[in-house]
Image (tube, rainbow, N blue to C red):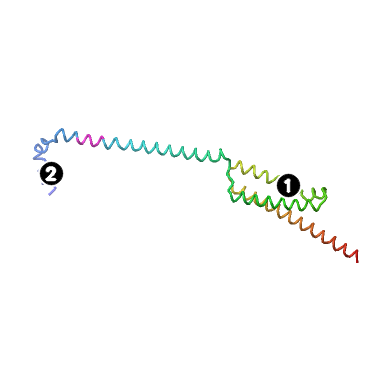
């Protein structure tokens, strides 16, 4: 069957070749191709501009939040810091009331060292833009200072109790 079709096409080639589409048909095809081909580059250009604009906006927004305000401490961290600082200052005052100035200085050597470390941690936190590990270290520092002060108060209380016992036994 394929041979018959081929033979028919060869014999009637002139009849196929003399019919051609009108000029109007070619113009319509040309216009449709122009519309479709000119639409895609325009869409790609718009997409590229939108991508660039959104990228620039996000970069500026991210940088402005850390540069203008510095690292932002969370409200939870600020509350915890305030709590520990107030407890530490109360405990320091209790120790100060029970000791002479020389004893007071000796008792608070470790606390003063931890105070200095805390100041350094706070500086590091401000330069590292919200590093969670630094924030955790700051809270641990405050907790450690509070623990040391509590132990020192316990020591002072036990010394006071021993002195009271000695005074009672001397009176008897």
Q: Is residue 33 left or right of residue 167?
A: left
Residue 23 lies in the magenta-colored region: no
Instruction: Give the residue pinned by disc 2.
Output: 6
Instruction: Give the residue pinned by disc 1.
Output: 113
For this rendering, which residue is in front, 156 or 50?
A: 156
Quadrant in which residue 33 is drawn: top left
Rendering coords of residue 60 (x, y %): 49, 37
Between disc 1 and disc 2, whose residue precedes? 2
Residue 32 lies in the magenta-colored region: yes
Q: Main secondary structure of the magenta part?
A: helix
Residue lying farthest to the bottom in this orientation? 172
- Judging from the image, what secondary structure is the residue with disc 1 in? helix
User: Mark 1 and mark 2: span between their CA atoms?
Assistant: 101 Å
For this rendering, which residue is in front, 37 or 154?
A: 154
- Judging from the image, what secondary structure is the residue with disc 2 in? helix
Read off the magenta span: 28-34
Rendering coords of residue 9 (x, y %): 11, 42
Rendering coords of residue 133 (x, y %): 61, 49
Image quarter hosting the C terminus: bottom right
Rendering coords of residue 28 (x, y %): 19, 35
Q: Residue at x 59, y 51 (%)?
A: 76
169, above or below 58, in the image: below
147, above or below 122, in the image: below
């Amino acid at each position: 069957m394929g041979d018959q079709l081929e033979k028919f096409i060869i014999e009637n080639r002139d009849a196929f070749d003399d019919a051609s589409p009108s000029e109007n048909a070619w113009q319509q095809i040309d216009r449709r191709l122009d519309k479709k081909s000119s639409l895609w580059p325009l869409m790609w250009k718009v997409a590229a501009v939108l991508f660039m604009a959104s990228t620039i906006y996000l970069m500026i927004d991210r940088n402005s939040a850390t540069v203008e305000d510095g690292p932002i401490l969370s409200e939870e961290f600020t509350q915890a810091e305030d709590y520990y600082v107030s407890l530490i200052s109360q405990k320091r005052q209790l120790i100060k009331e029970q000791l002479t100035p020389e004893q007071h200085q000796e008792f608070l050597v470790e606390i003063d060292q931890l105070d200095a470390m805390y100041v350094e941690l706070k500086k590091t936190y401000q330069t590292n833009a919200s590093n969670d590990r630094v924030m955790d270290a700051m809270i641990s520092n405050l907790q450690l200072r509070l623990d040391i002060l509590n132990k020192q108060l316990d020591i002072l209380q036990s010394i006071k109790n021993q002195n009271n016992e000695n005074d009672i036994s001397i009176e008897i």
